[in-house]
Image (spheres, grey):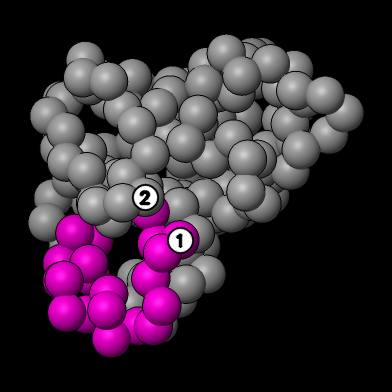
Amino acid sequence: MFEVFTYSSEDTRRWGTITGNVLRRADVVCLFGSLGAGKTTFAQGIARGLGVTANVTSPTFNLVSEYEGRVPFFHIDAYRLHNIEEAYSIGLEEYFYSGGVTVVEWPENIVSILPPVYLRVEILPQNGSARRLVYEPLGKRYEDVLEELKSIAHPGS
């Protein structure tokens, strides 16, 4: 596990960018947090780190947004899914295996179709615009991602 504190939306977005810089094809990031916690802000940073130049917005009403960057970026928002059958009917699970980076907001709504390994990031609001980002790796690949992030946060340690 690895924690980072951010103190503004731009700071949260910056940590998303740092995270996006170390991601590669087929990586999956699941963002947990309450409504308004900063999940979309963090996802915008990931997109920036992946070289996406388009304006990234919350895909709440169309569930998935696709963007071009150094690798494809798939942004899923499962907030409005009522049951897992809806996720299957639109093929959400296919994004996890399509060679891009997939970021999922509200992954708790589609837990049964998530891949067995992914990077879990919980965004916890603190006072004002401060956030606590809690990274948890599920799988060896994401342990390596965490080591890279730790070396960026604490160079030379």
Q: How far across and how far down the image is residue 47, in percent?
A: 32, 27
The vertical placement of 56 against 133, above or below, is above
Q: Residue at x 16, y 25 (%)?
A: 69
Identity, as a three-letter code, of the amino acid under mark 1 = Tyr
Identity, as a three-letter code, of the amino acid under mark 2 = Thr
| Magenta residue span | 77-96
Specify the label residue 109 is tagged with: none
As measured in the structure, the alpha-carbon distance from the residue carrying label 2 to the one carrying label 1 is: 7 Å
Q: How far across and how far down the image is residue 134, in percent?
A: 68, 44
Q: Residue at x 19, y 59 (%)?
A: 95
Judged from this view, the residue extending furthest toward the front is 61
Residue 152 appears anywhere in the view: no
Side of 139 where 66 appears, left or right: left
Q: Which residue is mark 1?
A: 79
Q: How far across and how far down the image is residue 79, in percent?
A: 45, 61
Side of 34 where 69 appears, left or right: left
Can residue 88 be found in the magenta stretch? yes
